[in-house]
Amino acid sequence: MGPGPSNPYPEVMLALARPVVGHLDPEFLALLDETNDRLRLAFGTSNALTLPISGTGSAGMEAAFVNFVRTGDPVVIGVNGVFGERMCEVAARCGADVVRVDAPWGTPLTPSALLEAHPAPSIIALVHAETSTGVRNDITPLGAEKGDALLLVDMVTSLGGIEVAVDEWGVDVAYSGTQKCLGVPPGLAPLTVSDAARARLVERPSSWYLDLNLLSRYVDGGTEGGRVYHHTAPVTMVAALHAGLGVVIEEGFAAAHARHAECGQLLRDGLEQLGLELFAEATHRLPQLTTVRVPATGPAGRTEADCRRLLLERFGIEIGAGAGQLAGQVWRIGCMGHTARRRNVVTLLGALAEVLGR
């Protein structure tokens, strides 16, 4: 448990142990194509340009901005947590004229505030599931009213855990990570790009490695047809992602979402029964990432860091510390992917009760 990597599915572990083939081997290219098809199902899209970026979720974020931001472009970014802040930093480095729209951490962004922040933005960007606060932001109203702006969404913690519908919601660019609700180790950043966004790709972005003009020629042959080598793809990680997506697809996305929802509710109820106060606004709490205020009182002389350390040392359970302005104020408890099981929640609650002396 914790906000970071969830335990991999057993099928993923087997995929990681497979013999390694070359990144241009026909067997791998067929696996990559099937992985991209599975990503389209996960994202809820028919976008041709859908692929796993070689790098963690932050590489997906950088790819999303570096390929679509031109110097001076007005980019509206919603900020109600660490990863909205990071979006501002990345966009600014790409030369964007960043227009921040802030909401108090722990509360959702207001869609109308984002839509009214600039008369003609190039991009509207926000985080769907803010990992630092446990808050879900609404996407649908933005897609319906964004006009000519591209809608860019961070889905790192949402993909596989709660509903995601890229095409239905009008999302133009979305990226995720493998280590959250997909139950795969960190190392890839699934990315999908609409045809409308693809027509607005920067011709020569500052990053050669993340240049989607070049990557598309390796993934789908580009506009000219025929694959062109770009970089050495992480073969083993793509195999792991293929396996993880296969597990979720076999379970069914609705069933996976329901499993995460059940565990999230069980966890929240148990934390409140321990006398702890939940942090995120009730109407927009994530089931897969629960934030709870650090208790003001505990065993004598035991700090919040001590409590987390004891959970890890005694029970092998890791929960996350507060991030950014919430450091030392909240704990972040992830219940994602293979870890989202009732038995894990019950075990955590019992261990936490012992550590807190409750």
Image: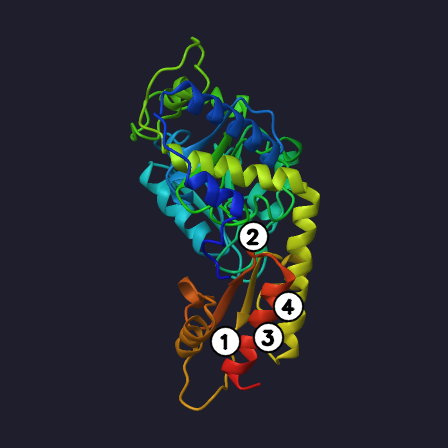
Sooner in the amino-acid sequence: mark 3 or mark 1: 3
Q: Would you name the residue on which mark 4 appears?
A: 268
Q: Which mark is residue 333?
A: none
Sooner in the amino-acid sequence: mark 2 or mark 1: 1
- Residue type of the residue flagged with mark 4: Arg
- Residue type of the residue flagged with mark 2: His
Q: Would you name the residue on which mark 2 appears?
A: 338
Residue 337 in percent (x, y) is at 56, 51
SS category of the residue bearing label 3 = loop
Q: Is residue 337 above or below residue 319?
A: above
Task: Rate crowding at label 2 as few (under 14), some (14 to 19) or many (20 or more) other CA atoms within 10 Å.
Answer: many
Task: Rate crowding at label 1 as few (under 14), some (14 to 19) or many (20 or more) other CA atoms within 10 Å.
Answer: many
Sooner in the amino-acid sequence: mark 4 or mark 1: 4
Q: Which-is-in-front pick, marks 2 and 1? A: 2
Sooner in the amino-acid sequence: mark 2 or mark 4: 4
Identity of the residue drawn at 52% across and 64% down: 333
The answer to which of 345 and 76 lies nearer the viewer is 345
Q: Which-is-in-front pick, marks 4 and 3? A: 4
Q: Are marks 2 and 4 in contact (CB under 8 Å)?
A: no
The CA distance from mark 3 to mark 2 is 26 Å
